[in-house]
Amino acid sequence: MFPALYAILDVSPAAGPDASVARIFADAGVKLIQIRDKKASPRKIYDASKRLAEKLTPAGVRIIVNDRPDIAAVIGAGGVHVGQEDLPVEAARKICGSARWVGISTHNLEQLRAANLTSADYIAVGPIFPTATKANPDPVVGLEFLRAARQITKKPLVAIGGITIESAEAVFRAGADSVAVVRDLASAGDPALRVREYLAIAGLVLSHRP
C-alpha cells in the first residue's frame, strides 16, 4: 500500500528542519519523505539528501529527492519527484532506473491524463487548498479536481497544497491515497503526535475504501 502520509522536508537553512526532525517523523510512522530546497546549490542538496538517506533508508523510510534524478541516483535514494517544468518522467526514469520511484506534479486534468500514460509511480495533484509554501503557487484546484482525478487514474494519488489535520479526512474521502504535508508538520508543537493523527485519519478512511 502506498504510504498515506508524505512528509515534505524543506532543508533550506531558513526553513529550520534538520535530520532530527526527519528522525522524529520516521519514528512516528512516516515511510515517505521528500527532501526539498528550491534555492540550494546541487552540492548542498546532495549533502542533505545523502545524510538523510543514509540515516533513514535502513529504517524503512523512502527518501525522495525533489527535482534532481541525478542526485537521487548517486546517493541511492528511493526516488525523485519532478514538476511540469523539470525533466519528463521517462527521462528521469532513465537516470534513476526502474528500482526507484518517479513521481510527478499535476495541476489540471490535461497534465494528469498525460502523467497517467507515463511510467510514473505516483501522481501528485494540487494545490488542493491555498498554500504559502511556494512563492508562485499554481491555481487552487480543490476537492472536486481530486474526485475527477480519481476517476481517471488507478495510479496512487498524492494530494498536496495547504492540507491540515482538519482537512485531511475530506481529502482522503475525495480519493487521495496519500497527503503531502509541509507546514502542518513543521509547525506542529508535537510533530510525532501530528504524524500519528494523520495516520489515524488515513487508516479510518482507507480501511473502508473498496
Image (cartoon, rainbow, N blue to C red):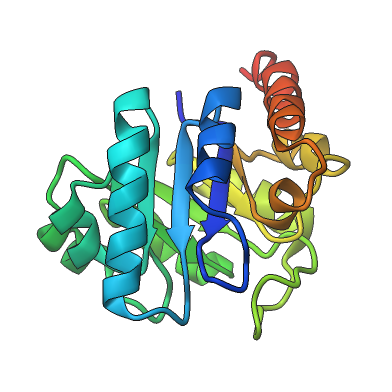
> Where the N terminus falls, by quadrant?
top left
> Along the line of sight, which residue is nearer the eye, 141 or 67?
67
List the single residue furthest toward the top: 207
**Is residue 87 visible in the rendered structure shown here?**
no
Q: Is residue 103 visible?
A: yes
State left or right for residue 146 relative to residue 36.
right
**Residue 119, image x and y in percent?**
26, 51
Name of the residue lying farthest toward the right: 166
| Residue 46 in the image, given as x and y percentages of width and height | 27, 64
Question: Residue 131 location, x and y as percent?
Answer: 75, 68
The residue sitting at 18% across, 66% down in the picture is 70
- Quadrant hosting residue 204: top right
Q: Quadrant of the C terminus?
A: top right
Quadrant of residue 43 within the rendered picture: bottom left
How far across and how far down the image is residue 177, in percent?
57, 35
- Furthest toward the bottom, the residue is 136
Q: Is residue 151 above or below residue 61?
A: below
